[in-house]
Image (spheres, grey):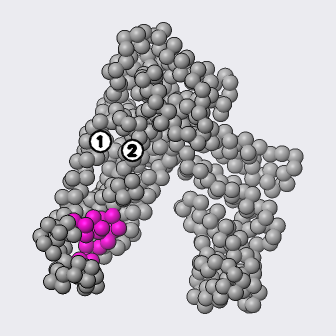
């Protein structure tokens, strides 16, 4: 191979190591060298050294970081998600992701960092870490919202920052389900499922016997899924795997001298599958409509058996309490700015007028040069806010829109627009109507970019744990940041 082709191959190996979380030591693998020699028909080819790959990864990180920094520079507002994670080596990390809408009304989302932290996760330290990341990326004047879980330290940290806090909806929903399942008849069915799966997971001989029975009965061969308390949807997946293999499981257990018993038909048909019907990930603007739908479904009827009435009552009570702790003022504005659900049917009639009045107030405050603020449900006398962040407004609005009376007309004109289907993209609608509603478009970019969950950070931690575990060597905190971010950035480009 000539030198340009060798350089291109070296860059490809560096990207592969970053995207697929391969250990850098893989360049010393004899088998890889043999494969490349055969593929290139160059039997003199030598793999690049570890130091060369590390240098290429460093350069690649700086290039990709510069690209992301330029994109963030063009954004008018940025939302962050953040969470802490402890590695198997007992090291603490903070993951932060950015979310914003670009000039073409496309939602952008990418990692900013997975930084190692030395201090305890107190509120002050968490707030300082978030500000430090924002300053590193020069977005301290653009950050408008922060989405985290509902841990006390995160809530307290958010109060110290001059931005809106949006609690993770997925965490709240998961906790409500967990609370409702405790001390209920569902416990017995789920416990049986766990014991059945454990009987095969922990015994290779039992697993082999199950696979033979699956093949004999014409079932697809595959292992069962055990649920994990911290993994969302895993309980549903566990139940589904038991249901899919109900025939082979009963046949194998019948031949064994074990006390493990399958859930009864009544438990499988009536309890679990009616309860765990699936889950949808929603945007910030769809949180209130989704909660409204869930609570409506959870209303008890005369046909419900006693166990279902108890579950629905427990779930509804817990979900209502968690809803009260959410930043509903922020969520209501986001809902109003989504053309799919701007009719606000998820709210009581009396609340709808208040939402539109709040939206008018936000626009007036923006014109007056102050940061838009809406009442946030927080305890009295919160800790003193830090240096305030600026909300960047568009300069393209006409002078007529600066008139308070014209602002009300602007909102009324938007209200009069017909709603769109839930399957349609709200950002596409805004890209076509931004010129007609320029003031509101500026707010829409802020609110619709806010994620409803902190799932992006959870994925970062999964990736970080994978990288740390596979490298088999001690990695510096900077290399962890580089590899996690590169895998996130380059992986997104590959998907596109």
Residue 124: tell me if it is visible.
no
Q: Quadrant of residue 253?
A: bottom right
Q: Residue at x 41, y 60 (%)?
A: 461
* Helix, strand or loop under label 1: helix
The answer to whether the residue labelled 2 contacts the one labelled 1, judged by CB atoms less than 8 Å apart, is yes
Disc 2 packing (10 Å; few <14; some 14–19; many ≥20): some
Residue for badge 2: 108
Q: Main secondary structure of the magenta part?
A: helix
C-alpha span from label 2 to label 1: 9 Å
Q: Residue at x 75, y 90 (%)?
A: 255
Q: Residue at x 29, y 68 (%)?
A: 17
First to last magenta residue range:
11-28
Q: Assess whether residue 467 is covered by the magenta stretch.
A: no
Nearer to us in this view, 395 or 156 = 395
* In this picture, residue 348 sits left or right of residue 415: right
Q: Quadrant of residue 259?
A: bottom right
Q: Quadrant of residue 4?
A: bottom left
* Helix, strand or loop under label 2: strand
């Amino acid at each position: 191979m000539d030198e340009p082709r060798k350089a291109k191959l070296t860059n490809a190996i560096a990207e592969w190591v970053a995207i697929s979380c391969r250990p850098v030591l893989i360049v010393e693998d004899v088998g890889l060298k043999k494969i490349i020699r055969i593929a290139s028909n160059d039997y003199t080819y030598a793999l690049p050294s570890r130091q060369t790959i590390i240098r290429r990864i460093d350069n690649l990180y700086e290039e990709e970081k510069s690209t992301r920094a330029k994109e963030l520079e063009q954004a008018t507002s940025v939302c962050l998600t953040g969470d802490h994670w402890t590695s198997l080596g007992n090291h603490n990390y903070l993951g932060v992701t950015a979310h914003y809408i670009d000039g073409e009304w496309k939602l952008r989302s990418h990692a900013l960092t997975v930084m190692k932290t030395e201090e305890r996760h107190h509120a002050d330290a968490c707030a300082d870490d978030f500000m430090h990341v924002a300053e590193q990326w020069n977005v301290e004047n653009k950050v408008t919202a922060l989405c985290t879980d509902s841990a006390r330290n995160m809530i307290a940290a958010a109060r110290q920052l001059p931005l809106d806090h949006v609690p993770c909806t997925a965490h709240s929903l998961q906790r409500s389900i967990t609370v409702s399942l405790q001390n209920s008849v569902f416990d017995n069915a789920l416990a049986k499922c766990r014991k059945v799966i454990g009987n095969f997971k922990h015994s290779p001989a039992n697993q082999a016997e199950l696979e033979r029975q699956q093949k004999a009965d014409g079932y697809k061969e595959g292992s069962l899924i055990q649920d994990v308390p911290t993994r969302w949807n895993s309980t549903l997946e566990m139940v589904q795997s038991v249901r899919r293999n109900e025939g082979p499981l009963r046949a194998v257990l019948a031949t064994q001298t074990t006390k493990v018993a399958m859930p009864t038909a009544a438990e499988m048909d009536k309890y679990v599958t009616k309860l765990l019907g699936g889950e949808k990930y929603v945007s910030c603007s769809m949180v209130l409509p989704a909660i409204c739908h869930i609570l409506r479904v959870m209303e008890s009827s005369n046909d419900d058996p006693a166990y279902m009435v108890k579950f629905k009552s427990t779930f509804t009570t817990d979900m209502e309490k968690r809803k009260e702790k959410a930043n509903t003022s922020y969520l209501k504005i986001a809902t109003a700015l989504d053309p799919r659900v701007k009719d606000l049917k998820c709210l009581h009639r009396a609340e709808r007028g208040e939402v539109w009045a709040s939206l008018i107030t936000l626009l007036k405050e923006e014109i007056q040069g102050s940061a838009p603020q809406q009442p946030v449900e927080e305890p009295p006398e919160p800790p003193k806010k830090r240096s305030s962040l600026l909300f960047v407004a568009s300069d393209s609005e006409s002078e007529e829109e600066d008139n308070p009376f014209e602002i009300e007309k602007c909102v009324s004109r938007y209200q009069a627009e017909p709603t769109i289907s839930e399957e349609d993209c709200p950002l596409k609608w805004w890209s076509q109507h931004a010129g007609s509603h320029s003031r509101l478009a500026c707010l829409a970019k802020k609110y619709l970019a806010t994620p409803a969950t902190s799932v992006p950070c959870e994925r970062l931690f999964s990736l970080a744990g994978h990288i740390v575990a596979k490298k088999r060597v001690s990695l510096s905190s900077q290399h962890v940041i580089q590899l996690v971010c590169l895998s996130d950035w380059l992986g997104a480009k590959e998907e596109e």
